[in-house]
Amino acid sequence: MSSILPAMLTHLRITFFGVLAAVLLGLPTAAFLIRHERVRRTLFVIIDAIQTVPSLAMLTFVMLVFGLNDTTVIVAIFFYSLFPIIRNTYVGLTSVDKGTIRAGKGIGMTNLQIFSMIRFPLAVPMILTGIRLAVVSALGLATTGVFIGAGGLGMLIWRGIQTRNMRMMLSGAIPVSLLAILFEYAIGLIEKQLLKRQRRSNT
Amino acid sequence: MSGFFAELSRNSHAVLVAVGQHIALSVVAILSGILVAVPMGVLLTYHTRAAKIVLGIFSVVNTIPSIVLLGVAMIFLGIGYIPATTVLFVYSLLPIMRGTYTGIKEVSPNALKAARGMGMSRLQMLRLVQLPLAMPSIITGIRLSSIYIISWATLAAFIGGGGLGDLIWMGLQTYNFNMVLCGAVPATILSLLVSFLLNRLIKRTSRHRREEVAA
């Protein structure tokens, strides 16, 4: 029992920093892409290809640069999170109703104001969807991190598998599954609430 | 880099065998996934409430990290090819089922009305109208599944499933990073290749769809 909590905290820390890095880079990138169609097309092909790299292969590629530790997993999570975050942010920012943007222009908003007061707020639910997808898959990847020497709940699972110790395995497997389901549900709930509020203010 | 190529030529036979195992493992999982998930997706379109429940259950299963399911499968089914394929099969179901379900649900009601007006039976409608129009969405689901499966098949090595994960694992245990790459590079190429081919198939089937709608 005593080893679960520290492992869980390490697991969450790895997930958090990986996704955070992708959000910090992804949001400005997506905003930039609104006006650069050609760059967007190339970039989407690249991040889609990154997404396709098998997780264990990605971990070993990153490991060659960053070594056998938590940083490698954080970097791998960052790479995998780029696609859901950039793509969803871009779709969210560009699927804003044209009439709303025209209305903004009509009342004399600058481009920056249109972005910060119209596009971005309306895109938030879509951005959250991207973050949710990234977080859930990151929790899974962080479990795999045990193979390249990182900490986290994967360690308990792996030790349990190796010693055929069901209880040890479940002491890692249950928390990690619950975390994934919890984040999926909680972020999904916030998305729904925001969408509901947006729809209400529309009418 | 040269170390990697030396290692690759030294182990060329082992790499080829591993690639073969990897493909066999993935193909069996995906094909059985298609055989089960497409009919299930179709059936679910007739029961929207059941669809919500079934898709909900499977999406919970799919949020569970793969190594957890592999561990559970190992405890109940033992080590080897069978438990590995079983887990991969279970994971492949959701994307294909969801792709089939949404693809068929998104078929325009006008196309259905026209089909009914021509006197098509339910089965004919499914075969001649709904499935062809849903094809891009179904293949999108298959593509998603395939990418997951190829990726997770590398993890299946840890419960004795064989494949390219074996090489990665052996390399990691002996600190031979060139051997790790002998597993990781082919796995990446395989995955990119499958993704590329299925993307082309999606484009081709959606062109077919547009022409049909226009005509």
Image: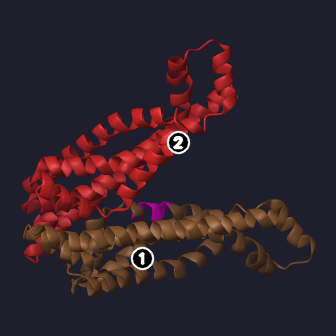
Chain colours: A brown, B red
Q: Residue B21 carries which label?
A: none
Quadrant of residue B174 in the image? bottom left
Residue A165 part of the magenta segment: no
Which of the image's four quarters has the N terminus of chain B?
Answer: bottom left
Give the tally of numbered discs: 2
Residue mark closest to the camera, 1 vs 2: 2
Which is nearer the eye, A160 or A53?
A: A160
Tell me which segment is drawn in magenta. Answer: A45-50
The residue lying at 25 percent from left, 47 percent from top is B26
Residue A48 part of the magenta segment: yes
How crowded is the residue under tag 1: few (<14 C-alpha within 10 Å), some, or many (20+)? many
Q: What residue type is labelled 1?
A: Phe
In terms of secondary structure, where does tag 2 sit? helix
Which is nearer the eye, A154 or B163?
A: A154
Which of the image's four quarters has the C terminus of chain B?
Answer: top right
With B178 as the anchor, is B31 left or right in this view?
A: right
The residue lying at 31 percent from left, 78 percent from top is A73
Which is nearer the eye, A175 or A68?
A: A175
Horizontal and vertical percent for residue B73? 18, 55
How crowded is the residue under tag 2: few (<14 C-alpha within 10 Å), some, or many (20+)? few
With A29 as the anchor, is A67 left or right in this view?
A: left
The residue lying at 40 percent from left, 32 percent from top is B39
Direction top: furthest residue: B119
Horizontal and vertical percent for residue B207? 58, 36
Horizontal and vertical percent for residue B205? 51, 35
Which residue is disc 2 drawn over?
B49
Distance (Cα) linking label 1 and label 2:
37 Å
The answer to whether residue B137 is visible is no
